[in-house]
Amino acid sequence: MTRPTLPPRFPATPDQINAQVRAFYARVRQDAVLGPVFGKHVTNWPTHEDKIVAFWRNAILYERSYDGNPQRVHIERPDVRPEMFAHWLDLFEEVATQTLPPETATPWVALARRIGVGMRAGVQSARQPKDAPPLLR
């Protein structure tokens, strides 16, 4: 039995996803906060960008080409700090509004922000001392 084909989460094409990811990471590489962290961990930018394109194509277009665990990857890198996610998301939004039409940029940024909240919380929780009470913000 085959799975039903779902419509995209919001209007977006594979070309738009590719363009957004590539434009975003071009900005990340130049960013004073994020650039050094990504530069330390990403040795092959085209491969990294292809993996992130697959992530977003899965999240937006419901393709099943992404295989990864972004939460684990971020937790395993001690130089990725929870407070960096707000900056990452602001930069993502800035690039999206410059790269994409509003009917694509607006819902994509909203989705990225929802994912970012979870990523930040996961990183923050993983960095808490074992017996510390959970942070609820």
Image (tube, rainbow, N blue to C red):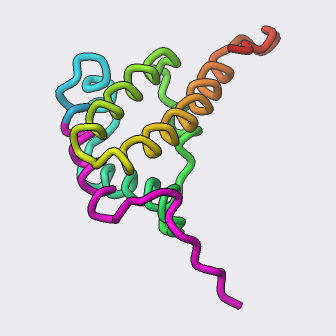
Of 108 and 134, which appears nearest the observer? 108
Task: Name which residue lies at 33% across and 57% down.
Answer: 50
Read off the magenta span.
1-26
Of 84 and 75, which appears nearest the observer? 84
Instruction: Determine whether 65 is above or below 114 in the image.
Output: below
Instruction: Determine whether 124 is above or below 99 in the image.
Output: above
Instruction: Determine whether 53 is above or below 83 in the image.
Output: below
In the image, 36: left or right of 53? left
The N terminus, quarter of image: bottom right
Instruction: Determine whether 110 is above or below 122 in the image.
Output: below
The C terminus, quarter of image: top right
Task: Name which residue lies at 58% across and 78% down.
Answer: 5
Task: Name which residue lies at 29% across and 57% down.
Answer: 16
Q: Which of the 4 quarters of the picture holds residue 32? A: top left
Of 79 and 21, which appears nearest the observer? 21
Q: Which of the 4 quarters of the picture holds residue 12? A: bottom left
Task: Name which residue lies at 22% across and 23% down.
Answer: 31
In the image, 42: left or right of 137? left
**In the rendered structure, does residue 132 fall within the stretch colored magenta?**
no
Q: Position of residue 7 (x, y in %)?
A: 53, 70
Q: Position of residue 6 (x, y in %)?
A: 58, 72
Q: Position of residue 69 (x, y in %)?
A: 57, 48
